[in-house]
């Protein structure tokens, strides 16, 4: 079984101006040392308006935190008012791009088809997608969690081949757990992540064991250790608790 490096990513959603983002990333870096960076990969995903500022701070101060974006369009350029292209993100040294977050699917009409287009565009431009999947409370209660997430994986990864799947990260985010303070139990999260990995194995055989799968949804300093104790869980995609640099650093230091 390959060793998968844990990955802790902060999704700042529509929070933090570029000035606030600079302060947060600097304060976060003061909390972290080499041992923390060796223990897991750290990613911050600010709003588009803060990407350039955060990139500049990370590079000037040689902070080993990876830069992520929260969304992308799949075309390289064109008449798409308000959109941001993968070329633009790659030029900012963005390493990760969240695609198919449930807020984009539910509030902005994103479909499995557009998620798949975005996923492939991110890979084409040398970045890594963080592909989000997850079920609603109704779907969970109706026993449809496994079919929902495996369907999202199959649709999102359609046409992704060769070495590309190895560069992808999957985030299992049950929609009922996002921003609600109600996290999935480590056992439930792990069971669904096992279903996701099985789906990836059907697509990519042994390579599936190298793909990192995060859990997301009300991850906090108080529950991260129990979640990370599950061998199937390779990290977290964190909303609210990543906004504060001390809280986020406590998540990154979950072993302490
Ligand atoms: P919370 O951690 O605020 O529940 O958000 C989770 C999430 O949506 C991360 O992408």
Image (cartoon, rainbow, N blue to C red):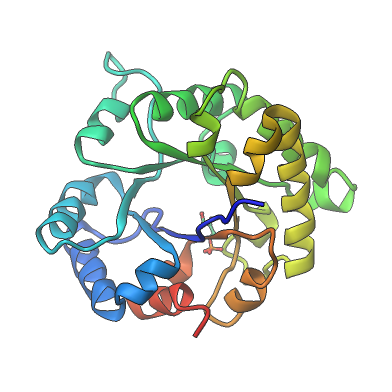
Query: Could you say where residue 165 lies in the image, as x and y percent from the top left?
Result: 55, 32
Q: Quadrant of residue 156?
A: top right
Left or right of 77 on screen, residue 8:
right
Left or right of 169 on screen, residue 208:
right
Q: Quadrant of residue 12?
A: bottom left
Q: Residue furthest front?
A: 1
Closer to us: 2 or 14: 2
Q: How many marks?
A: 0
Residue in view at x 60 percent, y 27 percent = 157
**Is there any visible trace of residue 129 in the rendered image?**
yes
**Is there any visible trace of residue 99 in the rendered image?**
no
25 up-or-down from 232: above or below: below
66 up-or-down from 184: above or below: above
Left or right of 185 on screen, residue 85:
left
Query: Could you say where residue 152 lies in the image, as x and y percent from the top left?
Result: 68, 33
Q: Residue furthest top?
A: 78
Closer to us: 40 or 173: 40
Query: Could you say where residue 163 lies in the image, as x and y percent from the top left?
Result: 51, 28
Residue in view at x 61 percent, y 51 percent = 2
Closer to us: 129 or 83: 129
Query: Could you say where residue 240 lies in the image, as x and y percent from the top left?
Result: 47, 67
């Amino acid at each position: 079984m390959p060793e998968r490096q844990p990955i802790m990513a902060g999704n700042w959603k529509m929070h933090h101006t570029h000035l606030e983002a600079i302060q947060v990333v600097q304060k976060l870096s003061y909390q972290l040392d080499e041992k923390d960076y060796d223990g897991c990969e750290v990613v911050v995903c600010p709003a588009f308006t803060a990407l350039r500022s955060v990139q500049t701070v990370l590079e000037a101060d040689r902070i080993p935190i990876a830069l992520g974006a929260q969304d992308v369009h799949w075309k390289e350029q064109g008449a798409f008012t308000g959109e941001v292209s993968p070329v633009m993100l790659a030029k900012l040294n963005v390493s990760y791009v969240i695609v198919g977050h449930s807020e984009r699917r539910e509030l902005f009409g994103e479909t499995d088809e557009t998620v798949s287009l975005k996923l492939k565009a991110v890979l084409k431009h040398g970045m890594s997608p963080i592909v989000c999947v997850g079920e609603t409370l109704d779907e969970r209660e109706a026993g449809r969690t496994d079919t929902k997430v495996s369907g999202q994986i199959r649709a999102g990864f359609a046409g992704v081949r060769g070495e590309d799947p190895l560069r992808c990260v999957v985030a299992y985010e049950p929609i009922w757990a996002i921003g609600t303070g109600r996290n999935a139990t480590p056992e439930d999260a792990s069971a669904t992540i096992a279903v996701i990995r099985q789906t990836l194995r059907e697509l990519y055989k042994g390579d599936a064991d190298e793909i990192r799968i995060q859990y997301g949804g009300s991850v906090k300093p108080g529950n991260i250790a129990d979640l990370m104790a599950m061998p199937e869980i390779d990290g977290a995609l964190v909303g609210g608790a990543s906004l504060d640099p001390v809280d986020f650093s406590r998540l990154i230091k979950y072993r302490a």
